[in-house]
Amino acid sequence: MIHKLGLLGVFILIACSSNASKQDGMEQQRPLIEISDLYAAGHEQLELALQADPAVGKMLDSNLAATLLINLTIEYEDGEKERVQQSGSFINNGEYILTAGHGFFVDSGKLIDLEAQTISLQKLALNVVSLGYSKDEFSKQDWAILQPVELRRTKSLELLPAGYSGKDVYILGFPGGMGLNDSSRIVHALEMDEGSVYPLAVICERSLTRPGILTPKVGAIPVQGMSGAPILSENGKLIGLFSSISRTRSVAGWHYIFHMSDIPFKTLDSLSIN
């Protein structure tokens, strides 16, 4: 388990790549560093954290199957199509899927396809049930409730009904659409032909004075592809959703929706009844 989850660590925020540049009249070739190499660089760091606290590894491992890669296909007015990737998770015993809402709001395009991919590479066609999103910087509305076209019962995340007072939180998702294959190698999830694709993990610290801000303790993640990724408590309960990232001169902050009370559970309850 430690070997599998060790590679879940992500270590460097920004992938570094460049073309050859000229300096003092001479060409200087700078090596291309693959993004997957940067993720793999976090192996040792997270492995040490899991050795120090094996309960964390057990908790993450038990929630892998509840995490999903969400794919939205957007068609623009000129006919061009774009695939948008997000992360999400099963809730309510697999009856619904929770993810971020901002990817569904496109100014000049329309959503023409929506599907999820499980860690066993099963594809699930989805319907949009309800959306909540606001561009207000201080708003916590950034969520989407989806439902598989063919309903299924499966592993889902347990919701924490009360506020979370702990400091450490854990994120499971697919940054850049990447994940782990069965050999614990970082791959692009859409390029896998067979075998499972496991989400990547990162351990973050929550600001107690500004609970909507996360900073990485073990690893770091780029924002694209992590939208909608579940934020877990130390006990593995769902406490929020990853939403966006902000940067200052010296600090990169991960914003998330805190707490799950920001999601309209009355909506979910009424859907369950219907």
Image: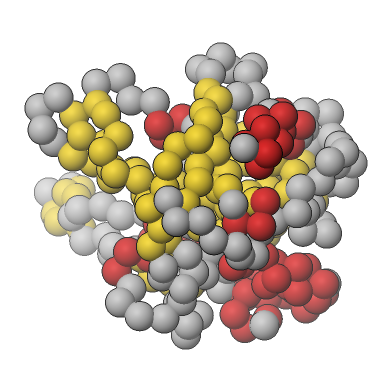
Residue 239 in view here:
yes
Q: Quadrant of residue 246?
A: top right
User: Is 199 or 33 nearer to us in this picture?
Assistant: 199
Q: Is residue 58 above or below residue 225?
A: below
Colouring used for the render: secondary structure
- Tell me the quarter of the image containing the N terminus: bottom right
In this rendering, position of residue 191 left or right of residue 122 = left
Residue at 84 percent of width and 41 percent of height: 161
User: Is 20 or 213 nearer to us in this picture?
Assistant: 213
Residue at 33 percent of width and 73 percent of height: 192
Residue at 38 percent of width and 62 percent of height: 123
Q: Is residue 257 above or below residue 60?
A: above
User: Is 183 or 72 nearer to us in this picture?
Assistant: 72
Q: Is residue 106 above or below residue 184?
A: above
In this rendering, position of residue 102 left or right of residue 17 = right
In this rendering, position of residue 81 left or right of residue 72 = left
Name the residue at the top extreme: 136
Name the residue at the front extreme: 274
User: Is 41 or 181 nearer to us in this picture?
Assistant: 181
Residue at 76 percent of width and 68 percent of height: 59
In this rendering, position of residue 238 left or right of residue 74 = right
Q: Percent x, y for residue 106? A: 33, 25
Q: Quadrant of residue 138?
A: top right
Q: Percent x, y for residue 167? A: 84, 46
Q: Percent x, y for residue 66? A: 61, 61
Q: Percent x, y for residue 193? A: 30, 77
Residue 214 in view here:
no
Q: Is residue 103 above or below residue 234?
A: above
Looking at the image, how many numbered discs can be counted on the residues?
A: 0
- Tell me the quarter of the image containing the C terminus: top right
